Every structure is written in C-alpha cells, then in structure tokens.
Amino acid sequence: MDAVAVAPSAGIDQPAHFTITIQGRVGDGLAEWFGPLTSTEIAAGQPPITLLSGIVTDQAGLIGLIRRLHGLGVVLLAVERQSNL
C-alpha cells in the first residue's frame, strides 16, 4: 500500500470543526453520548438523515468517534472537515 502525503497545514493534531452525516435519528439518550457534537435531523424521510456537528480535538478523536458510530451500527454517509480552530 502506498503512503498518503499529508500537507503540513492539515493540522491532524489540532482541534477542528467537523460535520458527520449519518443515516438515522439520534435519540435523546444517544445525544448525550456524542458530547459536544450537536445533532440536527436534515431529512425526515425514510430513512432519516442526521448531521452531527462540532469540535473534534484531533484526528485520533475523530477516529474514536467514527469507531463508536460503527460499534452502534450507524450508517456513515459523510465526514467533512469545516475548519481549523
């Protein structure tokens, strides 16, 4: 497998604002589980689509969050870095 070049300005060890789009709803019990991320239902169809948004401390924190979502069986649709802090 080839290595991926990362630009020095990527700041993978710095906090950044991310949005994570998932399939499904986030109930009140799970909302607390996501900590500082806010959840917004952006499409109420079948299946519903929810946007999780907030500050993630670094790339390791992002990977941990994605692993937790996977462990819950959540369908991940998109992960977008909005900005560095």
Image (spheres, rainbow, N blue to C red):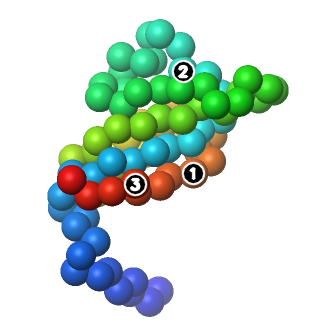
Of circles 3 and 1, which is in front? 3
Instruction: Specify whether residue 19 is in view.
Output: yes
Quarter of the figure with residue 45? top right
Q: Is residue 17 left or right of residue 46?
A: left
**Residue 69 location, x and y as percent?**
48, 37
Give the residue at x 22% y 67%.
11
* Circle 2 residue: 26
Question: How far apart, in angstroms, are the residues tagged by discs 1 and 2?
Answer: 16 Å
Give the residue at x 28% y 45%.
56
Element carrying mark 1: strand
Q: Which label belongs to residue 82?
A: 3
Q: Is residue 61 left or right of residue 45?
A: left
Q: Which of marks 1 and 2 is nearer the N terminus?
A: 2
Element carrying mark 3: strand
Q: Residues within 10 Å of mark 2 (few under 14, many from 20)?
A: many
Give the residue at x 47% y 86%.
1
**Residue type, mark 2 in image:** Val
Q: How crowded is mark 3: few (under 14 residues within 10 Å), some or many (20 or more)?
A: few
Q: Is residue 12 left or right of residue 37?
A: left
Q: Which label belongs to residue 25?
A: none
Of 37 and 74, nearer the camera is 37
* Circle 1 residue: 78
Element carrying mark 2: loop
